[in-house]
Amino acid sequence: MPRSPQRSEPAVHVSPRAVQSEARRRLPPEVYDYFAGGAGDEITLRANEAAFARIGLVPRVLRSAAQRDLAIELLGCRASLPALIAPTAFHRLAHAEGERATARAAAACGAIYIVSMAATTAIEDIAAAGDTSRLWFQLSIQPDLGFTESIVRRAEAAGCRALVVSADAPAFGRRERDLRNGFTDLPPGMCCENLRERLPSGELGRARDIVFSPEISWKHFDWLREITRLPISLKGVVHPEDARLAVARGADALFVSNHGGRQLDTVPATIDLLPAVAEAVAGKIPLVLDGGVRRGTDIVKALALGATAVAIGRPVLWGLATGGEAGVALVLETLRAELDLALVLCGCRGAQDVTRDLVSVR
């Protein structure tokens, strides 16, 4: 569903809540809960969205915003809007076409797509379905570094342009919805395709389980920096001191993320943590705000508080569940239209005009 140059609105306007409600109706309850749920009492999960309501926009007027450009360049990739598709697992649970459908929608909309290491479609097939000029790969470093390197090599060979390394999962969060539902494994015929072992013949064998290891440290980041030339972003950085360390050790970008509220409950909303991280980074590398973004106005707020772009997770899954490729494209195009309208009403021609004085924190 490419964007028509004659109009800034999608063919059908949908609200995020309406798409989520329809996804809930269509998905098996345990699958919906897996996608929607968070850790513990889900305090962080709720806070990610609620925090945006406490931030108001203070628009400027009479600034001639007739010509607008939403495009950004991030780690050498040019995207048509400052909203990336965040890495989320198990897309085939939402739609039979799974990550292939997501990749096609991302390509049609000109969006960066970060493929999860836990995808239910192999990175090679995702790359073939989409556009490798804006394809990134999320990596959880495994204690078996030889196996980790083999995953990196597959991502490189498939044409991925950057790695996004999850830094906030030394252990698996306690997700009580999944425990109640007994959701512990994928159904027959599905697995984490990017975790298949490479056999001596060169073919791919069985898929390993993801290992969440508390031993992963900065030395593993240094090792990864040595074995690949791809740009490396660190995802899950919320403490300013970690942001400073990441810059000093050569990270190319940071994702200010609390894992969508799925790891450590009671971590504050990422939009509340963003300003301190932005101050620590001081513009040296890009920042991506991940968590709770549902509207185009949320994107403007994140840009004003120091983000270069945002990442969208659950809304993409809801779009996938309700309409496959077309559903994902509609979610992205709705965000684009809302962002474009918000920029007009704030007197901005693009991200470069969005400044801190446009927001008021209540």
Image (tube, rainbow, N blue to C red):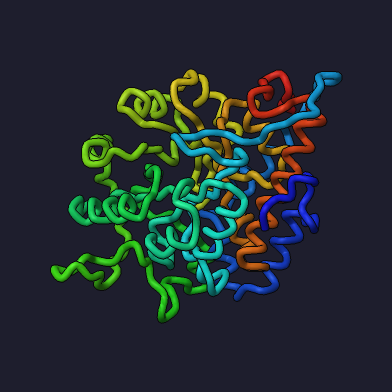
Residues 278 and 196: in front is 196
How many numbered discs sit on the rendered protein? 0
- Identify the image quadrant of the N terminus: bottom right
Residue at the (53%, 71%) spot, across then down: 97
Give the image quarter of residue 300: top right
Give above or below for 164 relative to 243: below
Which residue sits furthest bottom?
Answer: 188
Which residue sits furthest right?
Answer: 62
Q: Position of residue 243 (x, y in %)?
A: 41, 27
Q: Is residue 264 visible?
A: no
User: Is residue 296 toward the left or the right of residue 310 in the image?
Assistant: right
Q: Position of residue 307 (x, y in %)?
A: 57, 30
- Identify the image quadrant of the C terminus: top right
Give the image quarter of residue 16: bottom right
User: Is residue 83 toward the left or the right of residue 216 in the image?
Assistant: right
Give above or below for 260 relative to 301: below
Q: Position of residue 94 (x, y in %)?
A: 57, 69
Q: Is residue 206 visible?
A: yes
Q: Position of residue 107 (x, y in %)?
A: 55, 53
Residues 55 and 14: in front is 14
Residues 266 and 360: in front is 360
Give above or below for 171 relative to 355: below
Residue at the (51%, 62%) spot, across then down: 176
Residue at the (29%, 47%) spot, across then down: 214
